[in-house]
Image (spheres, rainbow, N blue to C red):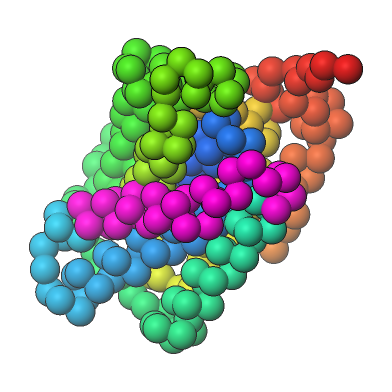
Amino acid sequence: MTFLTQVLNGLQLGSIYALVALGYTMVYGIILLLNFAHGDIIMVGAYISWIVMSQLGLSPVLAIVLSIVGCAGLGVLIDKVAYQPLREAPRMSLLITAIGVSYFLENGAQLVFGADAKVVPEYFELPNLSIGDVALSANAIITIVVTAVSTIVLTILVQKTKLGKAMRAVSEDMGAARLMGINVNNTISFTFAVGSALAGIGAVLYSMAYSQATPTMGIMLGTKAFVAAVLGGIGSIPGAVIGGLLVGFAEVFVSAIGLSVWQDAVVFLLLIIVLVVRPTGILGRPMTEKV
């Protein structure tokens, strides 16, 4: 019974990391940018839910929709204001800008909402399911199902749609994509919108599991999701999911054996081991450079 409960906990936590890692993977796959502000977009999504339900007293469904749409819009805004002007700049400039955007969002949230944690109301009161003597959390099941559906939809979007083809073309060769008539800036903004919408979904699922919003909640969540993306092979959609699940199970396993104070360290130790054995990640493609 305890084993099944821990497996479900690992799937739930890993699914949240996987969703956030998918956002990292999409942006990196297009413009080779490690968007360190991505975790803070999740923080904004959690605060949107708190405002809509706790402060305005509106429907949880509206809170979910506004959290996802708000995160998608914020992602596009960040791209237009902070990243698009530096499209031709060295990658280090983009990286420093991403870190700056992250600090701006964190300190802006602390200035507006204060440093104390805000309790996000429960979206829905769902009864737990039971299989024999094992109680299964409804929130955990919803998190796993939503992550699976989101991954499938994202894969279809990238592989089967015209916009997905444009995204893949830009990721392969931005200059050639321009010559073929693809609007590169709009394609990149669309990528940010999709990745940030996934962060919004992750914010809702995280709030369902932990019911709080703080200005710094995105730091460790975003960092672990980045670790998950690197573990799976950054740029790979299945890799992001596998990496997220690995990180989730690693944390739950360490906590289950009574070493919860080491759960963060174990995640980064796992990253070191995988990078030593396979530097490109589990499903990452070997990088070749022309000399």
Q: Residue at x 50, y 18 (%)?
A: 179
Q: Is residue 211 above or below residue 30?
A: below
* Residue interval drawn in magenta: 64-93
Q: Quadrant of the C terminus?
A: top right
x and y, in percent, of residue 120 in the image: 30, 70
Q: Is residue 290 above or below residue 92?
A: above
x and y, in percent, of residue 153 in the image: 32, 25
Q: Quadrant of the N terminus?
A: top left
* Nearer to us in this view, 96 or 58: 96
Asked if residue 264 lies in the magenta stretch, the reply is no
Q: Residue at x 22, y 57 (%)?
A: 66
Tally the marks. 0
* Nearer to us in this view, 249 or 268: 268
Left or right placement of residue 228 versus residue 52 in this view? right
x and y, in percent, of residue 221 in the image: 55, 56
Left or right placement of residue 230 versus residue 7 in this view? right
* Nearer to us in this view, 85 or 52: 85
Helix, strand or loop: magenta stretch: helix
- Is residue 200 in sight in this rendering? no
* Nearer to us in this view, 57 or 198: 198
Q: Residue at x 33, y 53 (%)?
A: 73
x and y, in percent, of residue 193 in the image: 37, 43
Asked if residue 82 lies in the magenta stretch, the reply is yes
Left or right placement of residue 227 versus residue 127 in this view? right
Q: Is residue 181 above or below residue 223?
A: above
Q: Residue at x 12, y 74 (%)?
A: 57
- Is residue 174 in sight in this rendering? yes
